[in-house]
Amino acid sequence: MKPLVKRRMFTPGPTPLLPEAVLQALVTPMHHRKEDFKALFREVQEGLRQIFKTRNDIILLTSSGSGAMEAAVTNLLEPGQKALVGVAGKFGERWLELTEKYSVQTKAVEVPYGESVDPAQIETVLDSDENIAAVFVQAMETSTGARMDLERIGALVKDREKTVLVVDAIT
């Protein structure tokens, strides 16, 4: 038998688990329609509401980060609607790819890898087209470490009644 080798991954995912979490996988899982699972699920949602300081619904997805991004695009937009994507690395490019594959008319604010998208550039595009239905950005671009100014970008989008802000905050 080969000895166990501890591997270290320096990638955005999958995320390594604590040994305690791995051991929990050996326990018989709760059935997702039983009361003990429903109670735990409600408890997790309430805890997340407190962490995120919201009273809004918390939606949990059993997918990769890219799966969550795709869910956001396909559930918030219809083909033919308009979106704006901030691109500062691989995951901004992923937003761009997803919106285009879903036939969303997409405008991009692209900056060189390692730089952050300037909120003024976002504002210029939003001011030029009142029909932009969504703005997609990362809180921090995992592939480069570039951090976006979400406070300023959020304020720009909040002023536009028909536009939602979608933030990939997985990092």
Image (cartoon, rainbow, N blue to C red):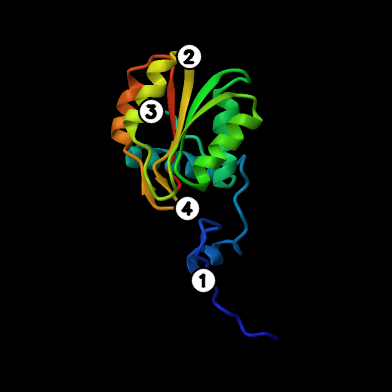
* Left or right: 97, with 49 as reference point: right
Instruction: Tell me the distance, in whole angstroms, between the alpha carbons under discs 1 and 2.
Output: 46 Å
Which amino acid type corresponds to the residue marked 1 in the rendered image?
Answer: Arg
Q: Position of residue 155 (x, y in %)?
A: 30, 26
Q: Are marks 4 and 3 in contact (CB under 8 Å)?
A: no
Q: Position of residue 143 (x, y in %)?
A: 47, 53
The residue wearing badge 2 is 131
Q: Position of residue 131 (x, y in %)?
A: 48, 14
Which amino acid type corresponds to the residue marked 2 in the rendered image?
Answer: Asn
Mark 1 Cα shell of 10 Å, populated few (<14), some (14-19), many (≥20): few
Q: Are marks 1 and 2 in contact (CB under 8 Å)?
A: no
Q: Is residue 127 above or below residue 167?
A: above
The residue wearing badge 3 is 122
The residue wearing badge 1 is 8
State the residue at coordinates (55%, 26%): 106
Q: In terms of secondary structure, where does tag 2 sit?
A: loop
Q: In terms of secondary structure, where does tag 1 sit?
A: loop
Number of the front mark, 1 or 2: 2
State the residue at coordinates (43%, 45%): 112
Instruction: Tell me the distance, in whole angstroms, between the alpha carbons under discs 4 and 2.
Output: 30 Å
Mark 3 Cα shell of 10 Å, populated few (<14), some (14-19), many (≥20): many
Upstream in the sequence, badge 4 or badge 1?
1
Q: In terms of secondary structure, where does tag 3 sit?
A: helix
Instruction: Tell me the distance, in whole angstroms, between the alpha carbons under discs 3 and 2.
Output: 14 Å
Quadrant position of the N terminus in the picture:
bottom right
Write down the quadrant of residue 13 in the picture. Answer: bottom right
State the residue at coordinates (38%, 28%): 122
Write down the quadrant of residue 149 in the picture. Answer: top left
Foreground of the two, 9 or 45: 9
Mark 4 Cα shell of 10 Å, populated few (<14), some (14-19), many (≥20): some
Instruction: Tell me the distance, in whole angstroms, between the alpha carbons under discs 3 and 1.
Output: 38 Å
The residue wearing badge 4 is 143
